[in-house]
Image: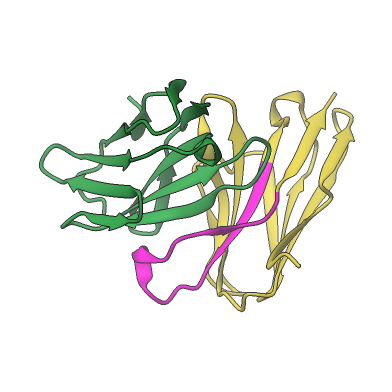
């Protein structure tokens, strides 16, 4: 079993749609959590950290469920520019583990 | 200008050749990392360094070595390249302060092909 698992997608949604991604992790001692965005052939860039109480940044909402060991990312009012691969990252004692990513395509 | 710069951007080499990938940063971060990315596998950690005198193996260090020449420079070497080392390689940095909550800042990647 992979330490960090994501649905690879692809998710194809129309502009304006709401889309949610989940990510599960196996290490219960994990301490910090992030969502990164990666455009095709580019480097990953931090989208947002995920806090225990959940957090929101504009159209993006991240949630953490420690009991069930998953994190989620919700994107509201999808834009064409949201098309990318979204990487879930879980950190345990400075050992950052990446999910393989979920690919999102937003269509006009 | 990029804060984390990798050279070369692309490299094609033959099996058995020694190759070095270089990374330099202007962010003043103490921590530096080398990852490789393969389709369907996500990024996997090769080596990391928390300061100039510190080198640590990551998840997949076999076949690789690193050198932290200065706070700003961290190079990755493949002593004898093999085809399954064909991948996209990323260098990353983090500040260290903030502990495990510090996110990573990535370079623009090196696409390596071993024939």
The residue closer to the viewer here, B110 or A16, is A16
Q: Is residue A35 left or right of residue A28?
A: right
Which quadrant is the N terminus of chain A positioned in? top left
Position above or below: B9 against A68: below
Q: Position of residue A73 (x, y in %)?
A: 31, 41
| Residue at image coords 81%, 29% | B114
| Residue at image coords 80%, 30% | B113
Q: Position of residue B3 (x, y in %)?
A: 68, 68
| Residue at image coords 50%, 73% | B95
Q: Chain B is which colour?
A: yellow
Q: Is residue A76 left or right of residue B10?
A: left
Q: Quadrant of residue A4?
A: top left
Q: Is residue B107 left or right of residue A32?
A: right
The residue closer to the viewer here, B111 or A42, is A42
Q: Position of residue B102 (x, y in %)?
A: 41, 66
The range drawn in magenta is: B89-108
Q: Quadrant of residue B84?
A: top right
The magenta stretch spans residue B97: yes
Position above or below: A97 against A32: above
The residue closer to the viewer here, A95 or B92, is B92
Q: Is residue A81 left or right of residue A95?
A: right
| Residue at image coords 37%, 39% | A77
Q: Chain A is which colour?
A: green
The magenta stretch spans residue A90: no
Position above or below: A20 against B101: above
The residue closer to the viewer here, A91 or B47, is A91
Q: Residue furthest left?
A: A67
């Amino acid at each position: 079993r992979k330490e960090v698992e994501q649905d690879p997608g692809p998710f194809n949604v129309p502009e304006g749609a709401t889309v949610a991604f989940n990510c599960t992790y196996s290490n219960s001692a994990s301490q910090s959590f992030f969502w990164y965005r990666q455009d095709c052939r580019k480097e990953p860039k931090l989208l947002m950290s995920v806090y225990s109480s959940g957090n929101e940044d504009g159209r993006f909402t991240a949630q953490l469920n420690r009991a069930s060991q998953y994190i989620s990312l919700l994107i509201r009012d999808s834009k064409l520019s949201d098309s990318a691969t979204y990487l879930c990252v879980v950190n345990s004692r400075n050992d950052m583990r990446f999910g393989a990513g979920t690919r999102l395509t937003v269509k006009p | 200008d990029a804060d984390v710069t990798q050279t070369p951007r692309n490299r094609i080499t033959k099996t058995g050749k020694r190759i070095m990938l270089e990374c330099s940063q202007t962010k003043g971060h103490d921590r530096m990392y080398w990852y490789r990315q393969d389709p369907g596998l996500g990024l996997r950690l090769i080596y990391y360094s928390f300061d100039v005198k510190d080198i640590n193996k990551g998840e997949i260090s076999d076949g690789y070595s690193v050198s932290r020449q200065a706070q700003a420079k961290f190079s990755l070497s493949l002593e004898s390249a093999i085809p399954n080392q064909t991948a996209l390689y990323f260098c990353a940095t983090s500040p260290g302060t903030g502990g495990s909550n510090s996110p990573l800042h990535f370079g623009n990647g090196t696409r390596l092909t071993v024939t």
